[in-house]
Image (spheres, rainbow, N blue to C red):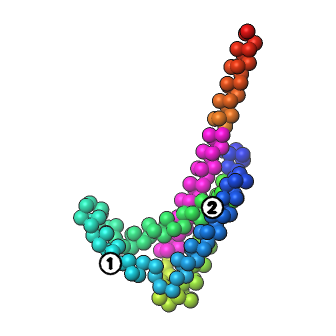
């Protein structure tokens, strides 16, 4: 891939800055809420999982697997936003920011929120989410560039066809 293929545009960076601000507030509220955000929903979640297990969801997908998956989804925007800010050539920064953000959250919960539980599994899931988000960001930049090149080629081909028609008349 060329450098231009992975460059983030001004528009994508502007959107990413706004998304980062909103997302940062959401992360802070969820991560540093004094009690687990799912505390009141646990019975409902257990019932939902039980019904899904009845319909064929493997028993291995339990509450812990759901929580791990939710942490992946929770941090995927980190990688995506970072890639939109810095471009795809530095995709790895999305993973680094996700890892550092996750460690910060877990340490904050460990030291300042006695009713919350800091775990290595959360750091792993969050970092994996940031990696997935980074990959999605690189793919989005690549497809955006690819579609722009396709449109440019089509316009060029159309212009040449008109020039040939004009020359033959």
Label 1: few (<14), some or many (≥20) within 10 Å? few
Q: Quadrant of residue 165?
A: top right
Seen in the picture, residue 149 relative to 76 is either above or below; the reply is: above
Disc nearer the start of the sequence (2/1): 1
Residue 138 coordinates in the image, percent (x, y): 61, 52
Q: Quadrant of residue 50?
A: bottom left
Q: How far apart are labels 2 and 1 at the CA level?
A: 34 Å
Q: Which residues are magenta?
A: 121-148
> Which residue is identified by label 2?
81
Instruction: Check the picture and name the quadrant holding the N terminus.
Output: top right
The kind of secondary structure element at disc 2 is helix
Residue 87 coordinates in the image, percent (x, y): 69, 55
Label disc, if present, on residue 140 of the rendered structure: none
- Horizontal side of 8 relative to 117 (left or right) equals right
Seen in the picture, residue 14 relative to 141 is either above or below; the reply is: below
Residue 144 coordinates in the image, percent (x, y): 63, 45
Question: Can residue 4 be seen here?
Answer: yes
- Horizontal side of 24 relative to 42 (left or right) equals right
Label disc, if present, on residue 43 of the rendered structure: 1
């Amino acid at each position: 891939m060329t450098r231009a293929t992975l460059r983030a545009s001004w528009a994508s960076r502007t959107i990413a800055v706004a998304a980062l601000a909103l997302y940062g507030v959401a992360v802070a509220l969820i991560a540093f809420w004094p009690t687990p955000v799912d505390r009141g929903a646990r019975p409902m979640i257990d019932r939902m999982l039980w019904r899904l297990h009845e319909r064929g969801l493997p028993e291995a997908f339990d509450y812990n697997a759901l929580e791990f998956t939710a942490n992946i989804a929770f941090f995927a925007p980190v990688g995506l936003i970072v890639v939109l800010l810095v471009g795809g050539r530095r995709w790895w920064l999305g993973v680094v920011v996700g890892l550092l953000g996750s460690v910060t959250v877990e340490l904050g919960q460990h030291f300042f929120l006695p009713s919350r539980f800091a775990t290595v599994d959360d750091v792993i899931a969050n970092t994996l989410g940031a990696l997935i988000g980074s990959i999605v960001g690189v793919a989005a930049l690549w497809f955006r560039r690819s579609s722009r090149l396709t449109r440019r080629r089509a316009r060029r081909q159309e212009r040449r066809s008109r020039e040939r028609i004009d020359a033959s008349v």
